[in-house]
Image (tube, rainbow, N blue to C red):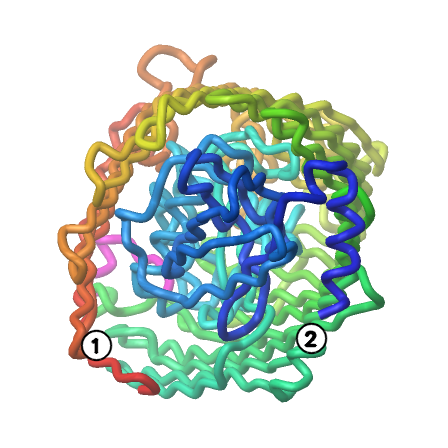
Amino acid sequence: MKKWILPLLYSLSSYGARAQRSPGGRVLDAISREPVELAVVTDVRTGRIELTDCQGRFAPLKITGDSLCIEVSCIGYGSKRLFIRHGDAHVIIPLQKSTVDLRSVTITGHAGVNSFHTLSRIDLDRQPVRSSQDLLRLVPGLFIAQHQGGGKAEQIFLRGFDADHGTDVNISVDGMPVNMVSHAHGQGYADLHFLIPETVASYDFGKGPYYTAKGDLNTAGYVAYNTINVLDRTMFKIEGGAFSTGRSVALINLLSAKARARGQSAYIAGDALYSNGGPFSLPEYFHRINVFGKFNTNVGENSKLTVSAGNMDSRWRASGEIPNRAVAEGYIKNRWGALDSSQGGYTTRTNFNARLTTFLPNNYILENQVWYSHYYFNLISNFTFFYYYPATGDEFRQHEIRNIAGTNTRLSKRQTIGNTILVSAAGIGSRYDHIDPGELDHTLNGIVLSPLQLGKTRETSIFGYIDETITQGKWLFNAGARVDYFHFYYDNLAPVADTFATDLYRGVNPRAQRATVSPKLNIQYSFNDRIQLYVKGGKGFHSNDARVVIANQGFEILPAAYGADLGLNWKPLPRMFINAAAWYLYLQQEFTFGQDLIDQPGGPVQPSGRTRRIGIDLSPRYQVTDWLFAFLNLNFARPRFIDSAVGHRYLPLAPTFTSTAGLDFRFANGINGSISYRYLHNRAANSTYTLTAVGYWVTDLTVNYTQKKI
């Protein structure tokens, strides 16, 4: 107990005489004893609100009489009302986990609680999650598609972007980037399959380029997942289904309850999956094994160390895309057949992550993080069959071996001056990618015939940012700026006989560098605890593939994205929460997957000109009864090229309308489940919209019977 009382006493001393008479405390999870961040502590008499920090602490509340009545609530927990007296200087308040009750969700103007945070907590609590794909689908308006086997990263669609596998969506887990820059298969490739869904404690997301802590690839938005620190129970799971599908999961506590009371915890998680992948004539033979472990311990009186490590091993066979006429003319029996049986992949990723959080005097919090990943990727594809090479076929391999290391440091402080709350933050960090080799090969039956591209890549980035949030009455102002510096190096190692690679990089400086500054400004006004307006504005960017940067002699290294949101949070009824926004995004340079640069199959993304997007997002949540919960997401976008000729301004494959909705039910007798749909509207498949990418509608039905331990 002394481990938190002493630093709390020291930090509260900055409040002076008022703090000496006013009690503060901590809010903890009743089972795991982990701090509950962003719990709302309300003075019932005055309505004044305080929020808990990352240590679960809330600032002192002034007592005017003999006692103070407070109510503590947090999404995903049952609320609690209690009295605090002058002698109760430091109160521990345990909260029990509970299903979300929208009647207890209020709109607050405090820093750290925004519409996206509220939606993420509601959706993670209510919507069933069975895979890492489901975790991505939790983000309102984010659509995914899987193709060419279950082992590839998902195709991501968000805010009018066909973001390929992550080009315009920044994804992280426990502060460690998931996206791969200058990836063999595409810029920003984000393979999230190493994340075991049962280990996810929370997630945060934001749309648009408005967040100083998020840098490269945060144009359409970001998604950040956090894994469980302390398991509340050991768990085993076995699943089975059609197409020879099976999965087993285990989460095991490694330390006793006594160790947890001393501030130490450790667990290990494992996930094994096998599937033949559906009705395809060519079985997928997909299997993936994940192992993940996490350890937490107090370091001295004021610091907490968290260390985690994990490994993913995934391999599969893919039927791949086929032309309609292959079926119509009898080359293959039906649409479940394959033209090239060698397609498929093998990938691994090993992660190490360490974070030290130190609680300094005067409410300062210092976070230091270091992370490392080793990555292997091998993918055989064939999109064009005999277009480039009529004799041997167009099959190709994308392959890389990569080591990545990075650091993050953040210093933050929350303070109250009169009726003004200030939240200040500053951060610095770095990332280094070493890719050797990175290659694109012409293959036949999986055997390399000749390299189309072969080289060594080194990419370094350094960043720093400052961020200030001021809450005064009904107003909240957030302003910040971010500086990013990139250094690219690409060494062409293709044989001299390969005239394509030789010509492309002959006489070109193998190094390029650039820096960019990204300002942000967000303003929020809360009329009351039921309605709130906000305006967001900012500049972001996405980096280009190092191979393209060097080939283009440093042109368009860090093209900017400028965005603005006008949004609304509204509780028209006690059981209803609505988030709506109209938005605009201008992109200085669109990156699309193309082959003009190298005139070979499987090339990297390339610059395609300026683009403009406007759209509307609407996300209502409604709790019909205590056991029935409804959600709906409607997302409209109008993506267009700016510089193209009239009639040629459609962005190929960019979504224009997506929608998801569902009903989740939970009965007291243990029966629970959901029925939901996902809809993607028809969209242009080329710049003139003379080709159409046909949309689709998918409906899911889940019914479970759940008891206390089963």
Question: x%, y% of residue 407?
Answer: 79, 51
* Distance from Cα at disc 1 to Cα at disc 2: 32 Å
Label 1 crowd bin: few (<14), some (14–19), many (20+), radius 10 Å? few
Q: Nearer the viewer, residue 180 or 13?
A: 13
Residue 387 relative to residue 707: left or right: right
In the picture, measured across the screen, residue 17 lies left or right of residue 598, that is right
Q: Residue at x 59, y 59 (%)?
A: 91
* Quadrant (top left/top right/bottom left/bottom right) for the N terminus: bottom right
Q: Is residue 244 visible?
A: no
- Tell me the quadrant of the picture where the C terminus can be found: bottom left
Disc 1, SS: strand
- Provide the residue span drawn in magenta: 320-330
Q: Earlier in the sequence, mark 1 or mark 2?
A: 2
User: 71 or 324: which is nearer to us?
Assistant: 71
Nearest to the observer: residue 431 or residue 599: 431
* 20, 318: nearer the viewer: 20
User: Residue 550 colored magenta?
Assistant: no
Question: Residue extending furthest front?
Answer: 66
Numbered tag placed on residue 295 in the rendering: 2
Element assignment for label 2 = strand
Of the residues shown, which amino acid type is indicated by label 2? Phe
| Residue name at image x 38 percent, y 76 percent | 284
Residue 387 in the image, given as x and y percentages of width and height: 43, 48
Tell me if residue 262 can be seen.
yes
State the image coordinates of residue 444 (x, y, percent, origin top left): 53, 67
Give the number of the disc on residue 704. Answer: 1
**What is the three-letter code of the residue carrying label 1?**
Asn
Q: Quadrant of residue 317?
A: bottom left
Question: Is residue 391 left or right of 669 when viewed as pictured?
Answer: right
